[in-house]
Image: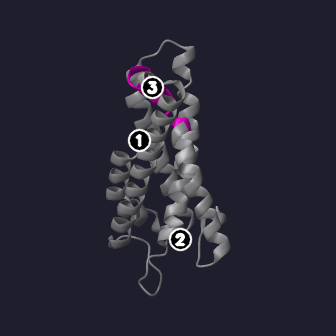
Amino acid sequence: MNFLRIENNEKDKSILTILKVLLPITYVFKLWFEAELIYNSVGASLGVLFGRILSYAVNGGLGFLFAFVAVSWSYSIFMKSKFSPVDENCNCKINKQTYTAICYFVICITNLIGGVLNFVPYAFPISTVFSMLLMPRLITLFAICGIIAILNTMCKKDELKELITSMAIPSIILLLLLR
């Protein structure tokens, strides 16, 4: 996961730019089932093409906005925590670009998994409540565990307790704001 460690050069920032572009696309894929439900109830009166485009764009835009706010806010709390991993100069070991890249990478992967799982209601008669409320929260829990696991690879072996302690409140923020 060293490609997610972003320093201050242009090559590494292109990875972050690619992840920023992929994030809304994966949100549209993840929220496909919800967007279809919105289209069938509201968007159908707007026309076939315009209603679908509008419902998908609104879902992708809101998902990206919530992810952007969640990642930025969680990093500001993570950085200010007295338990966050620091180097010998008392600076946080994980900079904002690296934290953002890790979060976006894990969120993109979980969005793809969630999007694939959203096709299950089409094949099996399961509850819409499960596919719209419970399944995204379970996937978000796995995403938070993945973020902590990748952050742990950038710290020393004995800093796991401090990392988990410093990620407590940011994890709650990510759980609440990620859809």
Q: Distance between the residues labelled 1 and 2?
A: 31 Å
Residue 152 at x, y = what percent?
Answer: 52, 62
Mark 3 or 1, which is nearer the eye? 3
**Residue topped by disc 1:** 179
Q: Residue at x 47, y 70 (%)?
A: 96
- Quarter occupied by residue 102: bottom right
67 in the magenta segment: no
Residue 170 at x, y = what percent?
Answer: 36, 58
Q: Is residue 57 above or below residue 75?
A: above
Which residue is more in the foreground, 169 or 136?
136
Element at label 3: helix
Mark 3 or 2, which is nearer the eye? 3
Helix, strand or loop: magenta stretch: helix
**Residue topped by disc 2:** 156
Looking at the figure, which quarter contains the N terminus? bottom right
Q: What stretch is highlighted in magenta?
A: 29-43
38 in the magenta segment: yes
Element at label 1: loop
**Residue topped by disc 3:** 39
Which residue is more in the foreground, 33 or 137?
33
Residue type at numbered disc 3: Tyr
Q: Distance between the residues labelled 3 and 2?
A: 49 Å
Label 1: few (<14), some (14–19) or many (≥20) C-alpha neighbours in 10 Å: many
Residue type at numbered disc 2: Lys
Lower position in the chain sequence, tag 1 or tag 2: 2
Residue 125 at x, y = what percent?
Answer: 49, 12
Q: In this view, does 7 lie above or below 131?
A: below
